[in-house]
Structure formats: C-alpha cells, structure tokens
Image: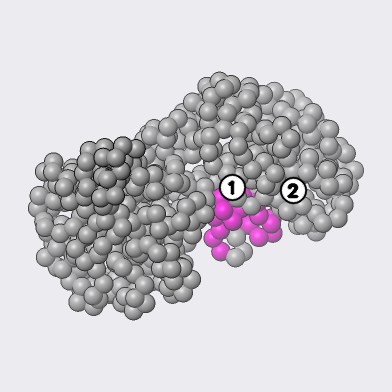
Amino acid sequence: MSAKKMAAKMDTDLTVDLGSVTMRNPVLTASGCFGWGREYSQYYPLNQLGGVCAKAVTVSPRDGNSVPRVTEVTAGMLNAIGLANPGIAEVLNSELPWLAAQDVCVWVNIAGAALEEYCQLAEAVADTQLADVLELNVSCPNVKQGGLAFGTDPAVLKRLVRAVRERVNTPLFVKLSPNVTDIRPLAEAAVEAGADGLTLVNTLRGMAVDVKARQPVLSTVHGGLSGPAIKPVALSMVYQTAKTVDVPIVGCGGITSGSDALEFFMVGAGAVQVGTANFTDPWAGPRIVREIEEWMLQEGVRSLDEIRGIAL
Amino acid sequence: MDMQVVSHSCVAPGVWQMELTGPFAYGAVQPGQFLQVLVGNGQTHVLRRPISIGHVCSLQERLTLVYKVVGRGTHELSQLKAGTVVDVLGPLGQGYPLPQASEDVVVFGGGLGIPPLRQLVEALHDAGNRVHVILGWASGQDAFWIEHFSRCAEQVIPATDDGTLGVHGTVIDAAGQLSTIGQRVYACGPKPMLYAVQQWAAAAGIPAWISLEERMACGVGACTGCVCQTTSGMQRVCADGPVFRADEVIL
C-alpha cells in the first residue's frame, strides 16, 4: 500500500449518521434474511456489520405458511414465509438479549395485524431498552390481514405511525412496500406522522408456476420477490423518495456488492440492508463493507457524506 | 469455500456424480449432512443447491455428491468439467445418530435419497454393525451405487416400481426379504416412502430416523424457509434436520 493510500485509509470513515442513530458502517442485514443473527455469527463476528435488523416479530407465535414457501427465480427468489416467529414474549426473552450483546446496532422489525398490536409490540421492545431502532413492517405481502394494507394507504399509514410514535421514543423507521403506484405519498405520510427514517423497499409481489406439476410453486400462490432482480426498482424508489422527503433512507433490494450499495448511497440512501445476498454468500455483509471501503480508498473519498445523494 | 471438481460423470439418466477435493473438514462430516452448492457466480442463481454428501474419503481428501438435474441450476452444475472450482458451504445440518453398540440395522433408500445412505452404511459397517439395505427406484435403468452398498452390507435388496430390477414393488414390499427386521431403521427418500417407513417401523416397534428434503434458501437455519411439522412444533429441515426421529415428524 502506498503512503498516500495508507494515509487515506487512516482517514476513511465508514461511520454513518442516520439522524437519531449512528452506526459504525452503512451495512445492515435485512429483516427476515438473518434470523436473530445467531446462525450467521458462526461465520463472522456480527460487529463487522453496521447493524442487524432482526426477523419480524408478532404478538403471538406464528408457524407461517405451508411449504413450499421459498423458491428461486431468475436473479432472485420468492418467499412466502408468512412472518414465522416465536412471538414477542419469547423473542424478548431469548433472542433480543443475545443480539444486544453482540456489539452491533440492533434494529427490531415489528409486524402487527392491527394498530393496537403495533403499539403493544413497540412498547414491549422499547421497555427492554435493547433495541437501537424500531422498524415498522407495514409491507409484508405474505400475511392475510394487516401488513400490506398499512403500507398502501397513506391515511392508514399516517394513523399507525403517529400512534406508535406517541407511545415510544425509540428511533422509528418505517419499511415501505414497493407494491404501490407511487411510493411518495406513503413516504410523506410516514414522515409527517413522525418517522425518523424510511427503509425501502420490501419485496415485490410475484409468483412462479411449476410446469411439470401444472400448479403454482408456492403454497400461497403469491410471494415476495427479492434479490438482484429487484435492485433497479428499489433504486428508483429510493431516488424518488430522497427527492421528496428529508429523513434518512435505508436502501434495500438486491444489494450483493459494494458497488450496488454505492448506487444506493448516490441516490440518497444513508445506509443499506442486505437480505437475499446472505443466502448466496454467508459472508456477504462484511464483504460489502470491505468493498465499500476499498472503493473509498481508491477514489479518495473519506466519508460517505461526500457522495450521498450525488446522483440526485 | 472453493473446492475443485476431480471427476464428474453421469451414473443414471439425469443423475450426476461429482467428486470434489480441496480444503474441507472431511473428518467432521456426519452421515446425512449436506452441502450448499453455489451455481455460477450467484447473480442468476441466488440460492445454493442443497446436496447431500454421499461419500467422504479423508485420506484422499475427496468427497462425492450425487444429484439429479431438475432445473436450470442443476443443469448448469452438470456442465462443470474436471478441474473447475465449485463454491460449497458445509457440512450442514444434523446427520444420522449411530448406535452405541453393534446392532442389526435396516436402511431404506429411495431414488435420490440413496446417496447419503452410502456414507451412513460405510460408517455403520466400520463401527461393527450388521447392515441390511433396501434400495428402491422407479426402474432398473435409474439404479446406481448398488456395488458400494454391497461392499458393506449383509444384504442389499433392490426394488423397482416397474419390476425391471429386484423386487417388483416398493421398498416396503421388499422388506419381506430382510433376514432380520433389525434393532433400528434409517431412511432417506421421497415423502411417500418415508411415510411408509415411518408406519413400518412404528408397527415393528423399532426406532427409526428419516432424512427430509425441502426447498431451502439459506441452508443454515436463518430464513425458516424449509420447515416441517413435528411433535414439538415447526422445525427447520436444514438446521434442526435434515435427519429427524421418525416418530417425531408429522408427514
């Protein structure tokens, strides 16, 4: 390494400031793709990540949908897990304390079937003081009630975010659905109701047919599409949203490399979530952090502030 | 981790045997465990293919996988030539628990469920057990690896749906030819076969272990894509299995 590069490395700062929360680097795992972190902690220490966004938790335990509930499609995958989780009591008892001890920013994703459930979940998590950020899941396409409805109607979303905001002080991010004609009214509604930031996007609705069996592959027919296939959609929605609202945005959708993450930063994202890429490469998170840092060194960029929104 | 293809050949119509070498914890592999195999660079095929480990040779640092071409991913995999590098993750999952003392053991295999049973039968044989094997296929042309089982087993009974090889019927139909019903049962194969084995073992009052197959995403227990219903609730096939006690699985 040349002296110049060495000096640059010492100065390279991967820290990101998302308003109400600071992380050591801009790479988070996406909810549902990383469990509560235990499984992946056998591959690397979780403090190599900026943060871990845990699997969505609901009030009661859920088995989720019948199998098959995952399948690969070209450059992506479909899932219809259906928010399988052991319920809030068990999660707060056995999962969250473990994750909170891993020296990483902890994001807890909560999913309710009704407004009151979101409030109940938010309070229960906030009471533990173990979560750095609450992420509202208003966009899960895999449950019959609630979920997506909260994420597609700006008035409903505003009421929900306002109610949760009034109950807890924990930094609040809202994860928006791409399954809308225009994402901007939803983003505006969430921000007006007091969201500290936005995560976008969740999965796109899709399906696959098993030609041999002559029936849909997934037991639920439809599922959520994720992976490289959706990156252009996610990027364009982050771009539109960054032009519309003035809160930190976390980009999510098909990010598999440092270069993919940089695309999101350049259209206004302050951080990124990595989901499906964990399945392809269990070391995807730390590798993406390293690739971002290498690019910064090469380009002489000392802080991501220098490039955030530069392509807007 | 990267491994190198040593040999790669067709062992039955659409069924391929891939021998790999490279840095790997060969000695740590339990019979019944699997690898997650990456196809290409992971951009087109984002999910790894779960393939059970058929044979391990620690001395020569080799392991053998057998898989069937069922879609574009496995077709692409089948095109790999000797010398090519393959990215694998593993060994993953919980394998078959072996008996503490020498026993008479019955092993049922069906189709692509047969490969992991070779490693199991070899381990059982090496530990001094007497192994009785029934292997089922749709047709005689689909059969493979009988010779490997014959080396370690007291008896190997083939069965085919069309009667072109061995017993005309299912593996359960062939069970009448066993010289003993044994003290424990192991099985791997399609779900209807596992169900039949589960019932057979329960009727005979013999403890049984079965290996399940399900569509997987992460392969390490994080995504909960591949679940099965058990007497103690939902379990993850990849991490809690793929081997389960037969009387605990609700098929």
- Dot 1 falls on a residue whose secondary structure is strand
Residue at (67% x, 32% y) in the render: B62
How far across and down, in percent of the image, does residue A282 sit?
Answer: 46, 46
Give the labeled residue for mark 2.
Answer: B186
How far across and down, in percent of the image, does residue B130 sit?
Answer: 87, 45
Query: Between disc 2 and disc 1, whose residue precedes?
Result: 1
> Is residue B186 a member of the stretch shown in magenta?
no
Residue at (76% x, 33% y) in the render: B159
What span is colored magenta in the figure?
Answer: B233-251
Q: Quadrant of residue B233?
A: bottom right
Give left or right: position of B8 versus B76.
right
Question: Which one is nearer the viewer's eye here, A306 or B246?
Answer: A306
- Dot 2 falls on a residue whose secondary structure is strand
Chain at numbered mark 1: B
The amino acid at mark 1 is Leu
Q: Is residue B185 visible?
A: yes
Point out which mark residue B92 bears: 1
Give the CA distance from mark 2 to mark 1.
19 Å
Numbered marks: total: 2
Few, some or many C-alpha atoms within 10 Å of disc 1 (few <14, some 14-19, many ≥20)? Answer: many
Give left or right: position of B20 versus B75.
right
Q: Nearer the viewer, mark 2 or mark 1?
A: 1
Residue at (24% x, 56% y) in the render: A16
Mark 2 on the same chain as mark 1: yes
Chain at numbered mark 2: B
Q: Which residue extends farthest right?
A: B179
Q: Is residue A226 visible?
A: no
How far across and down, in percent of the image, does residue B175 sit?
Answer: 81, 43
The amino acid at mark 2 is Tyr
